[in-house]
Image (tube, grey):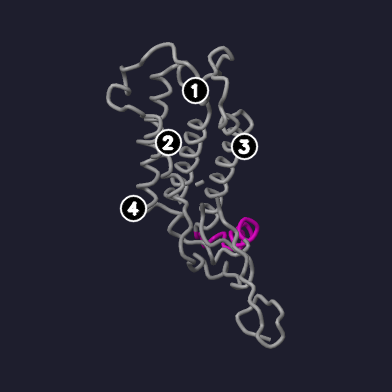
Amino acid sequence: MFSTCSFALALGLAAYLSASCLRAPFRVRATRLWKQDRLGFLVDSQATTAAQGALVATAAYHAAVALALTPRDTTAKLDAGVVHRLCPNAAHVSPRYLSWNAYTAACLVLVLCVGAPVRLAAYGGLGRNFTFRLARPDRLVTTGIYRHLQHPSYTGQLALLGDCGCSSPGPTARCLGAGWRRPASRSGFSGVIPGLLFTLPARRRSCGSCGSGFKTRRPC
């Protein structure tokens, strides 16, 4: 249980830091902005707020599923009810993304120890010259992290993709508890994403005899 809680907390911390790295540290004065910035709408306050909200919400859901799928014999019935509400088809969730292992540890370490620190160090190094919009800088910075990296912000942002790697979709796996299995014909989750849990509906196939669509593996 402690391992699962620490994993859920690590997911939450990674999501918080990743969301912080999506927010512009300073507002740019209108006098410093370039007249034309065609991609500026991608980094306005509404877009970044939506991205931050989605990131934190999906990480919280990821952590909740990980906690709910932790086997506890004394509360098996309660767990089954919680799992049914969180994930109607828990049999399609890969345990690989719900606990500590070499893969998830590597991805979270990449975010917590490389991506976020480098990105936030770039924020601090440039100060008010760090903007998400095209603007004129007031000086050239060659100290701090910029003494070692030319574009540390991009390097950190690339490393933050480890949060997505921790939750990238995996192969369909069996449910962690036999009592939580659901028929494969129902919609369920094939993998957990850092970021998103994809709900994959059952594939519809056409019947050769009647041409109707059905969700089962057997024809009419």
Of tags 3 and 4, which is closer to the observer? 3
Q: Nearer the viewer, mark 2 or mark 4?
A: 2
The residue beneath circle 4 is 102
Helix, strand or loop at label 1? It is: loop
Spatial CA distance of label 1 from label 4 is 36 Å
**Which segment is the magenta one?**
71-87
Q: Nearer the viewer, residue 96 or 117?
A: 117
The residue wearing badge 3 is 50
Mark 1 — residue?
131
Quick one: which residue is furthest to the front in this view?
36
Q: Is residue 50 above or below residue 63?
A: above
Instruction: Give the mark nearer the N terminus: 3 vs 4.
Output: 3
Q: Secondary structure at mark 4?
A: helix
Secondary structure at numbered mark 3: helix
Where 200 falls versus 140 (above or below)? below
Q: Quadrant of residue 146?
A: top left
Q: Tell me which label, 2 or 3, sits earlier in the chain.
A: 3
| Measured Cα–Cα span from mark 2 to mark 4 | 22 Å
Give the residue at x 28% y 21%.
147
How packed mark 4 is, by other alpha carbons closer than 10 Å (few <14, some 14-19, many 20 or more), is few
Residue type pointed to by label 4 = Ala
Q: Earlier in the sequence, mark 2 or mark 4?
A: 4
Q: Is residue 154 above or below residue 28?
A: below
Residue count near mark 3 (Cα–Cα under 10 Å), binned few <14, some 14–19, many ≥20: few
Looking at the picture, tell me which residue is in the foreground, 134 or 184. Answer: 134
